[in-house]
Image: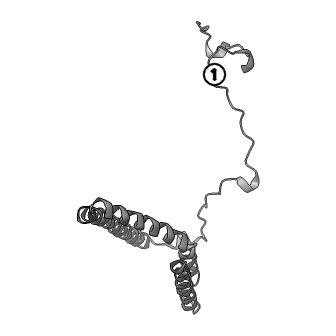
Amino acid sequence: MQLPNYPITQLPNYPITQLPNYPILPIPLPIPPPYPHSLSPLPIPIPTPHSPIHNLQPDMIARLYAKETKETLWSLATKGLAAVLFVALNAYLARALGVELFGVWSFLLSNLTIVFLLSYLGLNNATRAFVARYNGSRQLAAVLRASLSLRLAISAGFTTA
């Protein structure tokens, strides 16, 4: 069946149900209403003369960028080295153990990975947040002790289960 060759501006305004043999044409969607207040995008902070960003000197900003760059490069290097060593270790184990024992090793490693992920229970993120909050105060030692004791208790619970 040959479709009529209407220009886009002259398409007839038929409901879709009356066009059983026509291909589905893109229908323009209505413009959504503005975001409700709770879903509005976060405002971009604009520095004012009293904001802390105006107190930074250009040399301080350059040192911050240099520090962040150095730490990012070290992080990428360590993660890359760990990935390469992991692949090398798996290749060595595959040759040394053989097919059957390497399958057992892979099964054990995958189960341990799942158990470790479940045993974290968000404790690492919570510890990071509380260390940042109490950094430089006397309560930091208590936060670290509580985090370590919780980690040991949770790990003991998962290893005995």
Quarter holding the C terminus is: bottom right
Quarter holding the N terminus is: top right
- Quarter location, residue 20: top right
Please state the horizontal and vertical placement of residue 12, each as a whole percent of the image: 71, 13
- Quarter location, residue 86: bottom left
Badge 1 crowding class, 10 Å Cα cut-off, few under 14, some 14 to 19, many 20 or more, is few
Q: Amino acid at mark 1?
A: Leu
Q: Secondary structure at mark 1?
A: loop
In this figure, which colouring scheme has been used for the structure? one colour
- The answer to whether 7 appears left or right of 159 in the picture is right
Q: Is residue 27 above or below residue 3?
A: below
- The answer to whether 41 appears left or right of 113 in the picture is right
* Point 63% across, 21% down: residue: 25
Which residue, as the protein is rendered here, is positioned at the far front?
100
Residue 123 in view (yes/no): yes
- The answer to whether 16 appears left or right of 152 in the picture is right
Determine which residue is flagged by label 1: 25
